[in-house]
Every structure is written in structure tokens, then in C-alpha cells.
Image: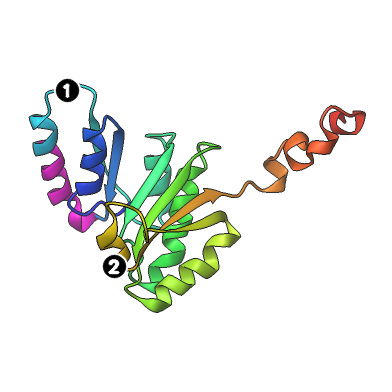
Amino acid sequence: LGAGCGLLGLGLTCLGCRAVLTEQPAALANLRLNVERHVARLTSGAAFAEVAKLVWGDSGDASLVRELGPFDLVVGSDVVFAERLVQPLLDTISELLSGSRDAECWLCLQQRDPDAHSTLLALAPASFDVKEISFAGLAGFEAAAALECVLLRLRLRMPPSKLKVSEANPEMAGTSEARR
């Protein structure tokens, strides 16, 4: 999400991941150029990087990107910087994760706009299970800890209507009540 120049997504391709790097229309040309240059230099055919337009909150864009999935992991770094973009960001993450039950989103955040940060933390639990992970004490992440960066792990909450009876109430699994 919000790939910028593509560093995070291209780094993931070097690790053998398939990556779809998304960005707003104004930044797409630079991102495409960086991805083309990077992919041309790789000798391994295992890496895969694709670029797609994604305006947060645009359900049409989100649907087109979701068709490139399903995604196991959606990542974003430094994407919470304006309060007006928090709800569109959360809506987009929800749409992208909806294609896979076990998918999650990892957002690496540094509090740049206190209002945006607090809005994210207030709104996200309505749609996601949220876990905040500190970088403090993790070897190799001293700079992230010093900058007070955190990792937010978001997992889409399944609406009760989409849960199987055994998931919603494990005690009932296998009973005649669960089979009705």
C-alpha cells in the first residue's frame, strides 16, 4: 500500500515473494520505472513484481487489485500521515484482505500526525483484530525503536454471518443444533 518508490515491495521480491506494488496515480510512473529496472536486473525467475493503481477508498481500484490476489500479506510503511485518509485506508485494507481468510496487514508506523494516528487506533478495531508490536528490544531494529515506530498487525474480523457454526460456537460443532 502506498509503495512510493517501491523499496519495500522490491525488497520482498528479492526474498522470493510475489509482490503487487500499489500507489496513487501521481506516483505510478516513478514506481513503474523502478520496478522495471529492478526486475530486469534479477537473474532469478522466482521474483515477481507488478504495479497497480490504487486510490484508497476507491472500491473499483480495490476490486481490480484484489483480483490480482488473493493476498497472504498486505504491507505498508509510513502510510498514516493525514486523518482524512485513515478511513479510506482501512476500507481499502478490508477489501484487499477479504479474499483470504488467513490474510493480514502489517503497517509500520511512526506517529507523524497525532490525530491520524489516534483515529487509526480508534477506528481499526471495528473491522480488524489489531495487535501493536513494539520494536524496542529487537536486535537490528534499534533505529525503529529510537524513532518510536510500531508495527500494527491487522486481521480482518469475520462478520458472524460468514462464520460457520463451529467457528462461532465451537462447543456446538457436531451437535444436531449445529447441523440445522
Instruction: State the scheme by which the image is colored.
Output: rainbow
Q: Mark 2 and mark 1: span between their CA atoms?
A: 36 Å
Q: Which mark is residue 73?
A: none
Left or right: residue 54 versus residue 95 is left
Left or right: residue 109 versus residue 133 is left
Asked which secondary structure carries label 2, the reply is helix
Of labels 2 and 1, earlier in sequence is 1
Q: Quadrant of residue 176?
A: top right
Q: Quadrant of the C terminus?
A: top right
Question: Callout 2 environment at 10 Å: few (<14), some (14 to 19), or many (20+)?
Answer: few
Q: Can you say whether 147 is above or below 170 in the image?
A: below
Instruction: Please say whether residue 31 is one of the residues in the magenta stretch.
Output: yes
Q: Which residues are magenta?
A: 25-36
Q: Position of residue 146 (x, y in %)?
A: 28, 67
Residue at image position (55%, 48%) is: 156
Give the residue at the far top of this rendering: 45
Residue at image position (12%, 44%) is: 34
Query: Which is in the foreground here, disc 2 or disc 1?
Result: 2
> Does residue 49 appear in the picture of this structure?
no
Q: Which mark is residue 146?
A: 2
Q: Main secondary structure of the magenta part?
A: helix
Q: Position of residue 86 (x, y in %)?
A: 43, 66
In front of the other: 145 or 43: 145
Q: Quadrant of residue 69?
A: top left
Q: Which mark is residue 44?
A: 1
